[in-house]
Image: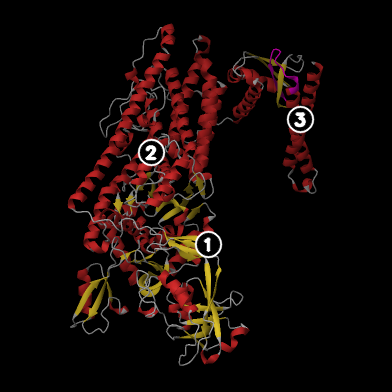
Amino acid sequence: MTITGAMEKPLDEKELERKLKKDQKAREKEEKRLKAKQKEAIRLQAQAASDETKKSDKKQKKKGTPDENPEDFVDPDTPAGQKKLLASQMAKQYNPAAVEKSWYSWWESSQYFVADATSSKPPFVIILPPPNVTGVLHIGHAITVAIEDAMIRWRRMSGYNALWVPGMDHAGIATQVVVEKRLMRDRNLSRHDLGRDKFLLEVLQWKDQHGGTILKQLRTLGASLDWSRECFTMDEKRSKAVTEAFIRLHKEGLIYRDNRIVNWDCSLRTAISDIEVDYCELTEETLLEVPGCSTLVQFGVIINFAYPLEEGLGEIIVATTRIETMLGDTAIAVHPQDERYKRLHGKHALHPFNGRKLKIICDSKLVDPSFGTGAVKITPAHDLDDFNTGKRHKLEFINIFTDDGNINENGGPQFEGMPRFTARAAIIDALKAKKKCQITIIYTFSIKGLYRGTENNKMRLGRCSRTKDIVEPMMKPQWFVDCSTMAKAALDAVKTKRIEIIPIQYEQDWYRWLENIRDWCISRQLWWGHRIPAWYVTLEDDEEKDIGSYIDHWIIARNESDAILEAKQRYPGKNYKLDQDPDVLDTWFSSGLFPLSVLGWPDSTADLSSFYPTSVLETGLDILFFWVARMVMMGMLLGGDVPFQKVYLHPIIRDPHGRKMAKCLGNVIDPIDVINGISLEDLGKKLEHGNLDPSELEKAKEGQKKDFPNGIPECGTDALRFALISYTSQSDKINLDIKRVHGYRQWCNKLWNAVRFAMNKLGDQYTPPAAIALCSMPPLCKWILSALNKAVGKTVSSMEACKFSEATSSMYSWWQYQLCDVFIEAVKPYFNQSQELESERGACRDTLWICLDTGLRLLHPFMPYITEELWQRLPQPKEACRKDSIMISEYPSVVQEWTNDQVENEMETVLDSVNKLRSLRPHTDIHERRPAFMLCRGVDIAAIIQCYQAQISTLASVSSLKILTEDDPTPPNCATNIVNKDLSVYLQLRGALNTEAEREKLRKKRDEIQKQHDTLSQKMNASGYREKAPQSKQDEDMKKIAALLEELEIIREAESELESNN
């Protein structure tokens, strides 16, 4: 395996300075590119306006209107932090770069994001899951920001004292790995070459250099975070909280030090958490690259070998996937009821390489007699199950590895110093070589040797997600948290609904994990992180001088001064040396305190009093246990209450092919690239500036070419946010397709044009009324307000239930299918110059303004930029005190007076009729207007059609519309469609009627209605229907059957007429 930079010459000071200057120039070039892109967007905006002006010159001359000035469509430059200056005219097309400019800095400088701890408003609090300080936000972070900002803006507009706290995580292992890779690649240095203090300076420089990237990304995404409360997990206040938590937990006996099995990374030489272990399933022999190994290593096999028995009793065969661990075997376990081995109970096997006696023990908990030979080798220091077995049987624990994965002196002189996977092959060879009679004091080895073969074996192999090294279970002295009592409290919190988990199916995962929780290893052998507040006392007369040799020599203290004071009290008159534990705490320890520490704990602060517990914890479902559960456990113990009342788990974002996003696949997406757009070439350049090895880099570039052959188109922040939230309806995974995001960017253009239309029709002199006379409004206006009311109600109820995709669906449907497609199209005739429509025209203006004002406020939490820009252009009511920004205006609520079920039912029939008429148009000339007829079978339906006749004509684009009764003759040369039993529609085709096509259309309709009739009849005739179904349901079904029969009769009449006319 290639080790990048292994043979490179270290950079001298001048070369290093040139390298840093080169990196700085690259960053400046990128900033210039973004600025140039913004200028280009403004130029294109002006150009589009100019082009549109040229196209409409002839129309303007005919109308006598003055020429347009392209500069009137371009926003003036706005000083940073001031309210955006808008162009005098709306641009002809939506441009996300132009729209999103300037608003955020004004919101921030106006302190709209700041919460007040003294406010009497009800609090609504979210803690942003802290991203890693040295990374950049990817699309997974973007969905977190989109959902949380939608919640916080909604609650802020709904009258809550909304607080959204930003923070960043020091990310111990992730940050250290990144910096170590950079050091090796750029300067051919390891952290050990530098030493701890100098290495930490390198990390801090890296943090200062790259940490600001995340802050810029969050602002670009429109995150309305309270920046006055920004924090970092290793700042002074958070560090104080971490130390205090450690001391309190230790004082209560919940933190202890012990020698136990941990996940060990031999490359990093540290214990790692479960979340940092990636598992791959192997089904057969597989050769894999392993860091530090020059050849591929064999996995996916099980190796059988024999241990000789003492007293000439023969041999016992065992099997293992890690043959190297046999050097640390201290026993062999069999099932107590296994007849094959009853004669061996209490006997011993002999280790072939060191003569160690291995006792044959009985253990029904560990051994399955039907698996393999029914005999299990026990390596208590290198396997969790074996460790527990060793504890039960008081076995010897022998560690055979050094921290970097070589065989130590306990492995014997034959293998000492070998890397573990080199030893793997050497041990197999040594077992095979036991062929000659080798006499020991007790036993003579057999002539055939001890190796018994290798077989394919299904196995789950753990690799460190950071280094890709094979995780080694190893017994190490570490600090642990006893989680049992805290886990029980966390379980009860969910069971008693003090905490609600959404989606609810993850409650069972919560119970399962906490009911089987193990103690938590919280120490890490890293340099970047919170130093453990523990000091070791080495007494002058101690036999063992290594740190940690005596478990009772540890002192837990807030600082070194306190540790010295306690040492003097504990060991009066003795000479000693005091050393702080070199290890640091697991990153999840400080993250687990975040809801408390960001609000000032352990101090009694106003924030802690006002905002704890927080309202909602929104995060990815993959860290439900590693972070969420630990916050609950630590929050309840140290804060006295649950840290949040709801947990919302969003799906994990994958690429369009369903693959997990990974840098080495080239499918990790920077949200800023979706917002601004980026070429394929520039995507590749970004990879080159990353930490990928050459082989990974080429693979990643190939992945980019496949997924983004033309780069990523500019979509804008609003479209990205809306798309991500709309995706949350998908189970536990999101297969992200950029085309869908770009579709919402085009939808933004629809919103833009709706407001442009309104501004044109309202006119410069329009003033919205303080109240509306609903009773005198046309039915169309009543309908759109009733539909808006439903959209408002559905959106609010969906937000309260954390059904965010249903909220986006409700808003999208109203804006797209009801306001834009129906209302705006239907009211256009009202805005001609006819005096007789003046009253209706006024009502339509008022209704249009109400719809846009309410609809934009409804949409704002999801699309903050475009809604602010469009809302600022709307006319303001004279006597109303409108807020300065949409984000602090009132969120819409249901207006009971607007609800009108009758009008909605009528419009449902009207729109169904329109769709049926549209479907009759020949595909060859769908734009030609033709005469239409509507056959009404009854007075009520005739009255409805008469009322909406003008709207039907407009929406169906017919040249004329005549209402017929049952007494009128059927119009000739017409295609027909049936709306319902009371209504049929006809479109005159003037000789273009395709009789065969019409006949087929009627046949399909008849089959469809007949199928509905048969299904309903079968249900009504089923056994028990009359006894079990409520009478109201039976009456309803009878009406449906009657209506279906009537429709079938109408279809038969239509078929007869078609035949008679031909």
Residues in magenta?
Answer: 981-996
Q: Is residue 396 above or below residue 839?
A: below
Return the disc, 1 or 3, that comes first in the chain's sequence. 1
432, 265: nearer the viewer: 432
**Quick one: quadrant of the C terminus?**
top right
- Determine whether, in the image, residue 283 is placed left or right of residue 671: right
Graded by Cα atoms within 10 Å as few (under 14), some (14 to 19) or many (20 or more), the crowding at tag 3 reads: some
> What distance separates the C-alpha of mark 3 from that of mark 2?
57 Å
- Determine whether, in the image, residue 573 is placed left or right of residue 717: left
Residue carrying label 2: 681
Q: Is residue 707 above or below residue 596?
A: above
Q: What residue is shown at x 43% (from left), y 26% (from top)? A: 752
450, 977: nearer the viewer: 450
Would you say residue 897 is visible in this rendering? no
Return the disc, 1 or 2, that comes first in the chain's sequence. 1
Give the label, 3 or 2, closer to the camera: 2
Three-letter amino acid code at disc 3?
A: Arg
336, 612: nearer the viewer: 336
- Determine whether, in the image, residue 433 is placed left or right of residue 202: right
Residue carrying label 3: 1006
Task: Verify CB contact (< 8 Å) between mark 3 and mark 2.
Answer: no
Three-letter amino acid code at disc 2?
A: Glu
Return the disc, 3 or 2, that comes first in the chain's sequence. 2
27 part of magenta stretch: no
Circle 1 sits in a helix, a strand or a loop, which is it? strand
Residue carrying label 1: 282
View extreme (front): residue: 436
* Residue 887 horizontal/vertical position (percent): 37, 36
Circle 2 sits in a helix, a strand or a loop, which is it? helix
